[in-house]
Amino acid sequence: MAQKEDIPHKTVYRLSIYHRCLQRLKENGVETVSSEAMARAAGVKSTQLRKDLAYFGNFGTRGLGYNVDSLSGMIGETLGTTRLQPVILVGVGNLGSALLRYGGFNKEGFEIVGAFDAEPAAVRQASVRIPILSEAAMPEFIREHSVKLAILCVPASVAQQVVNTLVASGIQAILNFAPVFLDVPPEVKVNCVDVAVELENLSYFIR
């Protein structure tokens, strides 16, 4: 198995797609799948699928394909989703509140264990069961709950300041919804979600 730092980020991203395809196959009672069929479902070429999986070991049997249950388990173990991964959310505005109400995180192996806002008393907590705490409480909460992953939904003007606190408190990976570049140490991973950029990209394909 290759070391984490040697595996391309796009390969790790595609692992999540493969995992979801395998989960759907399991739900439909499928026990084995060919690389061609799985590649079609994931939207990649079969050669790319085999190359991605080769980073993690030898899987599949020529003429039979992949065992759905064992391959799904391997990918889940690699992604760290075989147990609930604790996550915190920072910034409980409209987007943050919507994410807190989303019920699909647990199914995918993630549990939002805490939410934080600059003005927690002003946040509407209707239908949100997770307690919303002050940002000042983040460092202690992160350490007590061994949290390594955070979702950032704060305004761009304060995003870097908040990220500095998160990193200093032990956060190792951040899903960033703030439309701003974040300066973090090399060992901290940031994935940015910019809806405007994604729409701009899609607009190119509109005829």
Image (cartoon, rainbow, N blue to C red):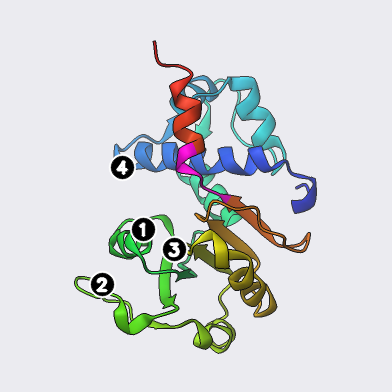
Residue 47: x %, y % from top left: 65, 21
| Residue furthest left in the image | 126
Q: Residues within 10 Å of mark 1 (few under 14, many from 20)?
A: few
Q: Nearer the viewer, mark 1 or mark 4?
A: 1
Circles 4 and 2: CB atoms closer than 8 Å: no
The kind of secondary structure element at disc 2 is: loop
Position above or below: 2 against 114 = above
Q: Where is mark 2, residue-wise?
A: 128
Q: Where is mark 1, residue-wise?
A: 95
Disc 3 residue type (three-letter): Phe
Circles 4 and 3: CB atoms closer than 8 Å: no
Look at the image and say whether residue 94 sits in the magenta stretch: no
Look at the image and say whether residue 193 sits in the magenta stretch: yes
Position above or below: 56 against 158 = above
Residue at 51%, 36% (x, y): give it. 197
Q: Where is mark 3, residue-wise?
A: 110
Position above or below: 22 against 34 = below
Q: Nearer the viewer, mark 3 or mark 2?
A: 2
Q: CA distance from mark 4 to mark 2?
A: 29 Å
Circles 1 and 4: CB atoms closer than 8 Å: no
The kind of secondary structure element at disc 1 is: helix
Residue range highlighted in magenta: 192-196
Q: Sequence-wise, which precedes: disc 1 or disc 2?
A: 1
Q: Where is mark 4, residue-wise?
A: 27
The kind of secondary structure element at disc 3 is: strand
